[in-house]
Image (cartoon, rainbow, N blue to C red):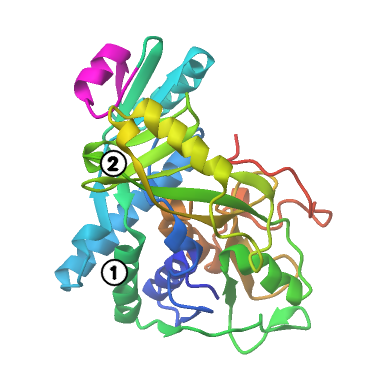
Amino acid sequence: MGGGILGAGAALALAERGHDVVLQERDALGSAMTARAAGVLSTMTWHDDEYRLIAENRARIGEVISLAMIEGVPHARSAWRPEGSVLVARGDGLAALDDVQDRLERHSEEPERLGHREASAEFPSLAFFPGEEVLVAQEDGVIEAGDLFTVLRARLAAEGVAVEERREATLPVAGGSVTGHDAVVAAGGAWTAGLLRDAGIRLPLASFRTQLASLELPRGGSTPIVHDAVHGFYARPEAEDTVLAGDGTRLTPHDPETYDTNPDAAFREHVALGITRRFARGEEARWRAGWAGLCVGTPDRRPLCGRVPGVDGLFVLTGDNGFGLMRGLALGERLADAVGGRADPDLDPGRFGPEAPLRFPLREGFSL
């Protein structure tokens, strides 16, 4: 239940392992929060476990796209494109830069560390300043969610998944077990907590609001992905003369039925400041569009992926903390593992115990 990147990833992984799968989505596949994502896949992470998930996801995307290209699926080639990333820091932030560099090197990546002059010469579309250092990762990339869902829809059909769109549904749970199916996976993104709650099940989940902007910027598409720890924003090339920029996160709970989908004034100002300072021609940037989406957090910032305690046959996949496209297909594989009896204890939905907190501090990123 749920046709975003997590639900589609789980459905595909389960079907590939021989299960008969029905995928239900309340609207159209990939049209809700997944469509509002930035589409950045970056290996510049703060935890080894997250690095492994992202690396698995990158490989899985490549596999799915390769199969789609062989089958002649439209837009398969444009669903993913390699794009280098730069992480910019200075002062106290250099210790984090050291940590990310060490992780990349331990996992056989080959990052490059540059001073501000070297970085300015290598990336003339960006501006760097004395005291700043730049870490460059070449194995990152951009996911175009719409094109990826064209690929996933074709792959789901090829694997025999029955897709039911615009289907409002409730969890088929009665008497401590699912009914009518051998197993049910609740992967409804920001709506998962409500689905579970309607069935009398409470898990520690909360949805928080993030914002993203599309801006016109001369030759913006020639820039790498930018993670700016100095000015607190990120940006990635969108088209030849446009970029997407984000990090207007509001770490307070929001209801998916009533949250404000429009960007607020403070976010617009924050993005304008970051773009102006970091891009060589940033003062020429012009606002095109902006929007807000919801991310789902957990108390320890790790996803819930596995069997729901106390309910036979019910599984959940949610809590990606805003990185669904970056980890979704890999988490779909982990969910299929759990259905097959090989659950990951670090992602076990029951790991918080019977007294799991329903209110907790929201934080970005992956568990440290």
Image mark for residue 151: 1
Q: Which residues are magenta?
A: 112-128
Q: Is residue 120 magenta?
A: yes
Q: Is residue 119 magenta?
A: yes
Instruction: Residue at 76%, 78% (x, y): give it.
Output: 176
Q: Is residue 58 left or right of residue 334?
A: left
Q: Which x, y percent locates residue 134?
A: 35, 21
Residue 91, placed above or below residue 230: above
Instruction: Residue at 33%, 39% (x, y): give it.
Output: 285
- Residue lying at the far bottom in this picture: please name it: 180
The residue identified by callout 2 is: 217
Task: Inspect this view and state whether residue 148 appears.
Answer: yes
Could you say whether the residue bearing mark 2 is in a helix, strand or loop? loop
Question: Crowding near pointer 1: few (<14 within 10 Å), some, many (20+)?
Answer: many
Question: Crowding near pointer 2: few (<14 within 10 Å), some, many (20+)?
Answer: many
What amino acid is found at the position of numbered circle 2 in the picture? Leu
